Image (cartoon, grey):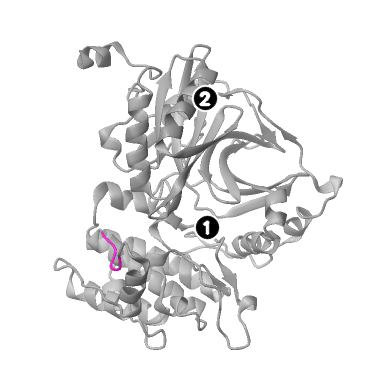
Amino acid sequence: MLGLHFKNNFGSIKSCHYKGVSTCKSSMNPPKVKRRVGKYEVGRTIGEGTFAKVKFARNSETGEPVALKILDKEKVLKHKMAEQIKREIATMKLIKHPNVVSIFEVMGSKTKIFIVLEFVTGGELFDKIVNNGRMREDEARRYFQQLINAVDYCHSRGVYHRDLKPENLLLDSYGTLKVSDFGLSALSKQVRDDGLLHTTCGTPNYVAPEVLNDRGYDGATADLWSCGVILYVLLAGYLPFDDSNLMNLYKKISAAEFTCPPWLSLGAMKLIIRILDPNPVTRITIPEILDDEWFKKGYKPPAFVEKEDTNLDDVEAVFRDSEEHHVTEKKEEQPTAMNAFELIAMSRGLNLGNLFDVEQGFKRETRFTSKSPANEIISKIEEAAKPLGFDVHKKNYKLRLENVKAGRKGNLNVATEVFQVAPSLHMVEVRKAKGDTLEFHKFYKNLSTCLEDVVWKTEEEMQEMK
């Protein structure tokens, strides 16, 4: 379904960090609300998937920031996804753990389903690896311990994630790991009479060999394999199994064909080899991992209070076409307004003239400012994208660009949105919605050369160009 890539939008009540961005307490008036869903003020888009979109929102009663996952009912029903969506929501409601993203409530309108989630501000573990490279063993071990805590708890509740990867592991402002995205999870009741799951899913590089052979698999041991790949990536800085040819990749995975880098300690090597055992029967179990000497170093079991009762009435209610269960929704019809504090929260410092900052590395989004009218900006992006092989879909002040040619991870989809900073100043966000991050990086480099006349540059930058 959708990994939640959270980026702050409003001035947060609490001091927090997301992808190197600091937000701070503000005494200013809240930004003008362009959209409201029930008691939640809705801000900008912070993530997208095939069937869902995630927006930053704020509880108007408490002021707390949340992530609002929005699903289109028509799409859900058309693609027969209702049961899977119900399963995802029910799964997340079953899991109450400090290392798992929390779900607060579920609401529905005539056309939409709204899932209110914990807003996690520290970004993805994936970004930490991309920006900083491999981790020291003590740091990698700390994240791995939290991952195993979360997975162990999920399995004890009969829940298997089935798509564990660094992109689905978020970090809060304290650096605590949070597992997200249960769109591919499976409850134990889905297990057939043979005691195995039979749905092939997940991300190829992280998928266990038994998932690929289509003969059924145990969800717990398959999740553990993915945990082993994640540990390898944390310590090595690259994947243990990788190949541009999918069949070759599958062969490497099935044979557990990998080599540990020489800088790994003997204890780390031994643990990785025991987890990445191609035979699920002899693969190490969670109790054995918890007893491993390398793993146990500095280990602290999670401390939290469990809630025994989980009410799933709201999950069923959102799928009923009943007015009494519908939440009120007000929609925006112009570029979303943005105040100074939102602007600071979205930017790296205050140098907003740079369209593509070299220091950003392989980010999934970038922004630029423009003094051109919003309609002109949209037209320019459309004109620039079409020669690059993209189909363009417009809706108000948003564009969705879809690459006709499939890349390494399918078709690259790019989302853009225009925000109004002042009557004569706009900020434009260009964000990868789907596909390979490196391909997105190449795309926006090409796009930047076509948009020079609409990008606002400071006097200092103009001087540098001369």
* Amino acid type shown at disc 2: Phe
Identify the residue at image location x=37%, y=67%. Answer: 246
Label 2's element?
A: strand
On-image quarter of the C terminus = top left
> Mark 2 or 1, which is nearer the eye?
2
The answer to if 241 sits in the magenta stretch is: yes
Identify the residue at image location x=59%, y=38%. Answer: 57
Q: Nearer the viewer, residue 436 or 459?
A: 436
Mark 1: few/some/many CA within 10 Å (<14, 14-19, 20+): many
Q: Is residue 119 left or right of residue 325?
A: left
Q: Contact (CB < 8 A) between labels 2 and 1?
A: no
Residue 169, percent from left and from top? 43, 57
Report the span colored magenta. Answer: 238-242
Residue 419, percent from left and from top? 52, 25
Above or below, 330 relative to 190: above
Identify the residue at image location x=38%, y=51%. Answer: 175
Residue 185, percent from left and from top? 56, 67
Q: Is residue 449 visible?
A: yes
On-image quarter of the N terminus = bottom right
Label 1's element?
A: loop
Q: Nearer the viewer, residue 321 or 170?
A: 321
Above or below, 439 relative to 63: below
Which mark sits nearer the N-terminus, 2 or 1? Answer: 1
The residue pinned by badge 1 equals 181
Residue 166, percent from left and from top? 39, 58
What is the chief secondary structure element of the magenta stretch?
loop
Q: CA distance from mark 2 to mark 1?
A: 28 Å
Q: Is residue 300 visible?
A: no
Mark 2: few/some/many CA within 10 Å (<14, 14-19, 20+): many
The residue pinned by badge 2 equals 419
